Amino acid sequence: MKLNMKQWIADTINTPVKKAMPVLSFPAIQLMDITVKDLISSSDLQARGMQLVAENTDAAASVSLMDLSVEAECFGSTIRVSDEEVPTVIGSVVSSEEEADALEIPEIGSGRTGLYIEAIEKASKLITDRPVLAGAIGPFSLAGRLMDVSEAMIYCYEEPDMVHTVLEKVTRFIINYCTEYKRAGANGIVLAEPLAGLLSPALAEEFSADYVKQIVDAVQDDEFIIVYHNCGNCTIQQIDSIIATGCPLLHFGNAISMAEMMPHIPAHIAAAGNVDPASQFRNGTVESIKKETKAVMEACCKYPNFVISSGCDIPPLSKWENIHAFFEAVNEFYVN
């Protein structure tokens, strides 16, 4: 379903009573009695899972899987898959300038990318009452997985040219990937760039934000937006370069205070966050998640461009009673 997403952002900001927009997809495995491995292996199950989440919640948007292994797997990375946790990347495929130069940009459709695009195409036909947002990894977070996350941070200082070589290639791949999601019917992308949240402001601009802007400039238009996600702990210090990417909706994790972040966000840009996914959605109680949700809203809803959300992707085995309690807390806040 085509939507004017710039208008959707403006309407979201201007509406005094806002719907929550958590990053909620993997817990659908409980509704279908399947495993994470099943979910990431089937476009039908992914689309059905998104549909079930939409039917069971009043979320502002339907957000696809935040699976940060898909793109790295296409580049040759080894991934670890389990029944109950999101997939993870193991090891590295680039550790020298020669390997960076030799790194090939995969075709879209290789690995699981084709399956994930099919899932969005199916979901966009099943879900017609809200935007459907696909998921993709950000450039530095993908480059970091190809070079090993801890090594990538060091390479920024010791081998910057190698890092830029990898970044140029992964950025071209992400642009191609987002373009195919756009053709499949997605209304936008949640671009997950958490590794950049560990960089200094200067390094974050050089090795992340400049490349995110390339992606935004290539694919964003009135009907398709890039939602920037970063759950790192340095995002307040990096906010100028994050805003400069041109993303109209920014999503932050619970490593920072949303109350401290909001004064830095221009009024025309929406910002979402940041109830703790692990301690509240996964391990909290109905009472505790309601308390934290209302506390975040009390601190931030004075800003019209604030949207309540989870701090990151909600874990697969998060209790549905906690998920429902989160939405109940949002409704109770506005009623009271």
Image (tube, grey):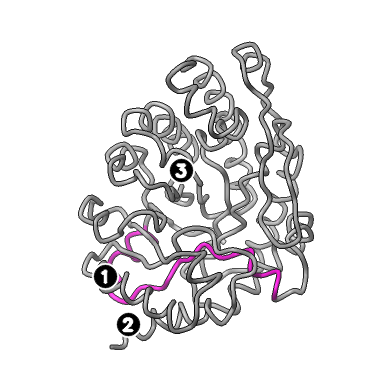
Image location (x, y in percent) of residue 168? 53, 23
Residue hosting label 1 = 301
**Amino acid type, residue under disc 2 in the picture:** Phe
Q: Where, quadrant-wise, is the N terminus in this rendering?
A: bottom right
Front-most of residues 246 and 168: 168
Do residues under tags 3 and 1 come within 8 Å of each other at their CB atoms? no
Q: Do the residues labelled 1 and 2 touch (CB within 8 Å)?
A: yes
Please tell me whether mark 2 sits on a helix, a strand or a loop: helix
- CA gap, disc 3 and disc 1: 27 Å
Range of residues picked out in magenta: 7-30
Residue 8 forms part of the magenta stretch: yes
Q: Residues within 10 Å of mark 3 (few under 14, many from 20)?
A: many
Disc 2 designates what residue? 333
Residue 266: x %, y % from top left: 23, 51
What crowding class fits label 2: few (fewer than 14 Cα within 10 Å), some (14-19), or many (20 or more)? some
How far, Cα to Cα, is label 1 from label 2? 10 Å
Of the two numbered discs 3 and 2 in the rendering, the one whose residue sits closer to the viewer: 2
| Amino acid type assigned to the residue bearing label 3 in the image | Gln
Above or below, 326 relative to 75: below
